[in-house]
Image (spheres, rainbow, N blue to C red):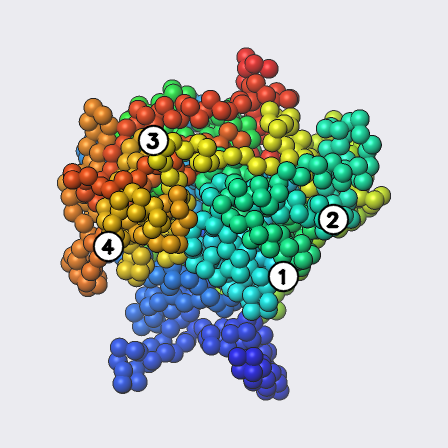
Amino acid sequence: MTEDLDEIAQRVSAARAATEARGETFYPGASRVHLAAFPPIERWDDWVELSSRAWPAREERHYMLVPTTCFNCESACGLLAYVDRDTRQVRKFEGNPEHPGSRGRNCAKGPATINQVTDPDRVLYPLRRAGRRGEGQWERISWDEALDAIAARIRKALTEQRHNEIMVHMGRPGEDGYTERVLASWGVDGHNSHTNVCSSGGRAGFQFWMGIDRPSPDHEHAKVIYLISAHLEAGHYFNPHAQRITEARQNGAKLIVLDTRLSNTASHADHWLSPHPGSEAAINLAVANHLIQTGRYDRDFVRRWWNWQEYLTECHPTATQTFEQFEQVLKNLYADFTFDFAAAESGVDAAVIAQVAELVAGAGTRLSVHCWRSAAAGNLGGWQVSRTLFLLSALVGAVGTEGGTFPNAWNKFVPRPIHTPPHPSVWQDLSWPAEFPLAQNEMSFLLPHFLKDGRGKLDTYFIRVYNPVWTNPDGLSWMEMLTDETKVGCFVALTPTWNESAYFADYVLPMGHGSERHDTHSYEQYDGQWIGFRQPVLRTARERLGEQVTDTRQVNPGEVWEENEWWTELSWRIDPDGSMGIRRYHESRARPGEKLTVDEYYGWMFEHSVPGLPERAAAQGLTPLQYMRRHGAFEISRGQGALHDREVPASELAGLAVTPAGRVYTRAPAPESPNIVPTGAPAPDGEGRRPVGVMIDGTVRRGFPTPSGRLEFWSSTLAAWGWPEHALPGYIRSHVHPTALKPGQVVLLSTFRLPTQIHTRSANSKWLDELAHTNPVWVHPSDAARLGIARTGDLIRVETEIGYFVAKAWITEGIRPGVVACSHHMGRWKLSGHDEGGVGAMMATVDLRRGDDGWSMHRTRQVGPYQSSDPDTARIWWSDTGVHQNLTFPVHPDPISGMHCWHQAVTVRPAGPGDAHGDIAVDTAQAREVYQRWMEQTRPADRVSPDGTRRPKWLMRPLKPSADAFALPAGSDQ
Ligand code: SF4
């Protein structure tokens, strides 16, 4: 292989020499260098392939290749649309070699975008409810009718000062800040996200350390890779990370994986640890203790970058305030976390944990770590899993080093948009309630309970790339909320396909897939920064052919629109004459008084906010927008290194003030470039100076955006906001710890997904559905024997706190005894007697009833072959589409991070004679009781806030309100 690449490199050199000898410019881009099999970019306007269907005849097909970005997970890999020059339709999608993150490679879900585009069941026209909500009666309407009606509602709510009755609930954002900008322009704190059912637990642990909520591991250069997630198959940014992990392993890196299941990722590990769910932090602390007790940590890094002085001052004020004293305290702090203790908690052999600890000790600064969803999303106190994992990086000094782990902001770039509305001056208590002042993200999954509590109501509620009835726990409480017009006045579903929530909407509005819309994004996938550009590929193809396209609906199927143009149009109709101050954020700068177009929005951004892009574009005779339309992505920098260690220039140090703990404040204005280093998270000091860095050995360095400017081993925030006992990296026993289980109960591990499906978004891909369509429950043979489950495929009943589901068993040694596991991506359903349709290949038809003792769901029809415009739907050979387990889970909000703790203590038994596959029963009254029990664990801001605010201002928050809105309302217990 190496020789082949050498040969290719030689041929490329020869081609360059020949091109330059002709006086022409040779394009040195990715597609000509590292993957010569990709079509070179200079031939993207007319790429010729032979038709496979015409074989053996040599029939040429001419394509225009247009880059875009995959929207089937958060990795945002580059795609190339093959647009047939004759039919002007997309023939297929392959990888974009110009994309620095994915480097031309995709998982199965990327090319399957073509299935979504051609899906015969997709929603093509705006629809309005014609009968009762959820009754299944719809009428086709025009976009104008939908826009006018919705805009009128929002305008009325805003003029009546009911700002908190407008909410947009985001699933996968797939973009950086556009929707938040729209909501800010309306002056509403209406952004809601899915993050507290997804990654908040993982994020919180990193945020308390770094002030930044995501890690950016440099897997490619690591010596040891330590994963508490499934990064080779489904974790965060998994394709870009997986290819780099694979390369590192080819270079000798060792892979440690903590995963209770034998996942695909675990199957590649050098050391696979299968812990009891929730014990992962105990293992991390045993490894940390080994490093500490044997002195195999980076003393100088710890001395310079940890906030140990602050910790000693606050928690050991009578001790000698020296680093040596801190080291002694550190030894005592973790002495109880022996290998034997971790083994007793986790069930993993102590000798195996010792081997892993030795590997970590030998990694030096080339230890890359990641923890996402998984254990951090499954357990009470799961955020301590990522906090203790990063403790290992912080001990060995593998932070911002080659082969180490970076704060994600070092490797991500968010450009400034053309208009920046001010922060809204209101606070949305339905998303950020007082009980959770430290919640990592919006308490989205508690919304039905908050409305049942009578805390408020919603006038207009949007969902967007989101299916709360299906994705969240306790989905039937969501259904009760969405069908109650006194709680939700108008429910708008922005979606490309029917889903379990859209059935209860008032408006279903068709939005585009990944090749039918504009977005920008940038994600931390290696030590560098890039920006990617999603675009409607047929629009770009037609513009390349000289046609003018002014509205994406002109090229999308049916009347499918893109969100950006929709939000602009809606904002104009809310404020038609500009008197509300909204319209100006959606107006052209170049043509005042006219609507902002997507070309101007992105053209301005690429011209003014992306360093290096205008110059690179000019070198190719292109505008920055043309460059992005042509390449699909741009690498801004590579090798960022340890930005926290950079000296702050003297020009930024005017009016310097230094706290006793070394935090440095300045009066100098913030630097122009927003992405140099985010230092400004803490509030200004009493003199109005802003934080600019931290004093390290007499030099002002950028530091981290934490209150101390250092890595926070001890969190003054947790200590001051009511949780001093958890201010250090520690171990919180999970709600599914063995001591919390009732006799006969086992743990249901419910947080994993299959590599070829992702929530609602991918189910309308026939290729993916054929690959993965069901979710049997993993049961260890010893448990199967104990429970009387004879063979794989037998029906079992899994009983939770609020109901049960009936599924098939898969008897496998790939799960540890005492734990069962079920993927959360299956069990899609549509209601019987409805005409809407759904996703024909993946949605079973169900009868859903409400009786005195709660809800019951029963399958009336499995999926099977059917006639449609796609002949493949007549070839569907599967009928089992799995079970919707999430409906049977009550809410479990972690009192600190706010994360829903997904794992369940369940009783598993063979199905009874009346049970059928897919049956579900749920008592939402019991769901209320569980909600109330978990709420009792919280410590509300009005009891614990040290400064009369609702939340520490330095903590991250999407769409942050103005500083005034942080004040607790008058009359709270302050
Ligand atoms: S679904 Fe696959 S191809 Fe698409 S962004 Fe995610 S990893 Fe990349």
Density class for disc 1 (Cα within 10 Å; few <14, some 14-19, many ≥20) is many
Earlier-in-chain disc, 1 versus 2:
1
The yes-or-no answer for disc 3 within 8 Å of ligand 1 is no
Nearest the camera: 397 or 62?
397
As helix, strand or loop, the secondary structure at mark 3 comes to: loop
Residue that numbered label 3 is attached to: 801
Earlier-in-chain disc, 1 versus 3:
1
The amino acid marked with disc number 1 is Lys
Q: Is residue 199 above or below residue 526?
A: above
The amino acid marked with disc number 4 is Ala
Label drawn at residue 223: 1
Earlier-in-chain disc, 2 versus 4:
2
Earlier-in-chain disc, 3 versus 4:
3
Density class for disc 2 (Cα within 10 Å; few <14, some 14-19, many ≥20) is few
Whether residue 33 is visible, yes or no, is yes
Residue for point 56% across, 72% down: 29
The Cα atoms of the two marked residues, 3 and 4, are separated by 31 Å
* Residue 893 at x, y percent in the picture: 45, 31
Label drawn at residue 295: 2
As helix, strand or loop, the secondary structure at mark 2 comes to: loop
Label drawn at residue 841: 4
* Residue 277 at x, y percent in the picture: 46, 42
Nearest the camera: 673 or 597?
673
Q: Residue furthest top?
A: 971
* Residue 597 at x, y percent in the picture: 46, 50
